[in-house]
Amino acid sequence: MSSRWAVLVLVVGVAVSSHWGAYAGVAPGDATATLDIPCKYPAGLASDGKHLYLADWRAAKLFELDPADGRVVRSWDAPTLKPAGLAFGDGRFFVSDDHTGLILVTTPGTGAVLTRFEAPGTQAVGLAYGDGVLFILEGKSRKIYRVVPEDGTILGYFDVPEAGCTSMTYVDGYLWVANRVKDELYMVRAETGKVVNVLPAPGPYAAGLAAGENCLWNVDFQTRKLYCLALSGDQRYRLSETREARVEYLWALNNYGPGEVRDLVVNVAVPDSLPNQEILSELQYSMPPTRVAADQWGQVCAIFELGQVPAGRKQLFTYSVPVRVSAIRYLIVPEQTGTLDDIPADLRTRYTLDGSRYRVSSPYIQETVKKIVGDERNCYWIARKIYDYLIDRLEYEMVGGWDVPEVVLKRGTGSCSEYTFSFVALCRAAGLPARYQGSVVVRGDDASVDEAFHRWAQVYLPNYGWVPVDANHGDTKGPADQARGFGGLTNRFLITTHGGGDSEYLSWGYNSFSRYETSGYCKIEEDNFACWEPLAKESAEKLQLPGRPGTADECEH
């Protein structure tokens, strides 16, 4: 780990906590300090490692601030009428003008302009400096350019994470980019433009970012505040947008005859509490299950042995449960996920096994994963390369059935389950533990019916545990939206199932699975769906349970 990243990750937990509060209970993105600023129209923000420097867009002034209390050390006129971006590097200040498109290089002491050059576009709204390269966020083209800091010669470029990005800063191989429209902060790999993480901004109009000695600084245009944001803590994920609902799951079979259904057994996955969901009371069944048992993956199932269903008869049952579900977002620092050697041996062995729907040992899967992963050993980047490959390779299409990954990858289309099986198979072929989760889903309104359901993968990352990965959800063009599918889930899911495949009770399915025989020909219609209904406030209060902190040692293993 590099020295600057060690500052941001470790010092936030130590030095900042000694100033601003306890380290325990800090989640990534939490504001550990809030300071007033001396101007009304903040724009660019920069740091020289000792002081902060802030640009006022309207007054065309620059301020040097003491990060301990926000005190103005000095101020001077900006070298342009509309300063926007601000960066410090190699003993120089870089100031951009988003009206003229000029980049001005000045001395920190006198503010004298050493040189100036044109940016790659007229809307140079954000600047960052790192490893001898100047980064320019150009608003009109929505590109981030890597340029030579002396004259603006373009070295390369990539798309901004999303429309609405206006400012950025550099931290050891990563750009942090602020989106003032969506009120989000993006951690972006500076070499490729890949978005690694998405954090909520502390205010409604993120106007500038700077990497300080103790935290990531963010100035907000609307609140006119300066926020010190933690980038690490004992909580490795953030929960948000909690909803409380009663979920009813129904399974039914109609036998239209003329034969008889025999030995009908239905196994139903029993949801349990997880970091992003709480089961607020025991499941209420319309009929008692015959027994309850766990499969080889630890998935608990309610088993209903229903026997015979004569012609012209229907068999059904339901369960109902109140739940509290939240959006979850892991802050994954790739350098902290270790290598394959850091994964516990028993877990790695168990969750890299082959399966009939994975066909990990097939020459095609083996050759494909070698091309994707190469010599990569970092656990995050192994998983991310596979994830990106699926996004580039596949398009969503649900045509029925779950074909094996080799067929899906050659065809180029797949359902959510086929995306998931392909990801799991490629991860396992690379030696990285992977499995899947299945769920029932909120469809649109809070009160809704789900007949389609959803499944995604989980990958095991050292120091983080099992992390959700949904390549189907991330299969978009925007870098920020692609990142949302890796390490995050919305609040639309009640997770019912986790497994590695070929479950003794659920086979390769999720939510429920049925087995039966027939005497002669039977026309059979099997159905299952879930209904969501928001909990009334008074009901939710009666069911209130203690919350679960997102500490690293409470990640599901």
Image (cartoon, rainbow, N blue to C red):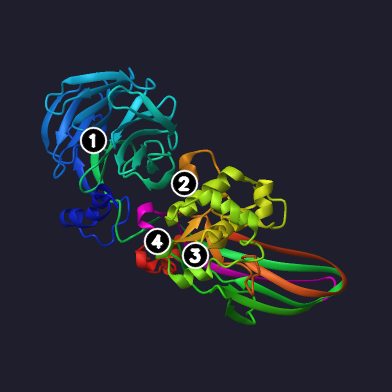
Q: Is residue 61 above or below residue 460?
A: above
Magenta-drawn stretch, dominant element (helix, strand or loop): strand
Q: Which residue is pictured at 30% across the width and 61% down the height?
A: 234
The residue to which callout 4 is attached is 464
Local SS, label 4: loop
Residue at the disc numbered 2? 483
What are the residue bounds of the magenta stretch? 310-338
Q: CA distance from mark 2 to mark 1?
A: 26 Å
Camera-nearest label, 2 or 3: 2
- Of tags 4 and 3, the one toward the viewer is 4
Disc 4 crowd, CA 10 A, few/some/many (<14, 14-19, 20+): many
Closer to the chain start, of discs 4 and 3, is 3
* Three-letter residue code for mark 4: Tyr
- Which residue lies under the disc numbered 1? 46
Question: Residue type at mark 3?
Answer: Val
Q: Out of 133 and 480, give the one closest to the viewer.
A: 133
Question: How far is mark 2 from mark 3, CA to CA?
Answer: 27 Å
Query: Is residue 99 in view?
Result: yes
Q: Which SS class for mark 2?
A: helix
Tell me the number on the disc at residue 323.
3
Q: Which mark is residue 252?
A: none
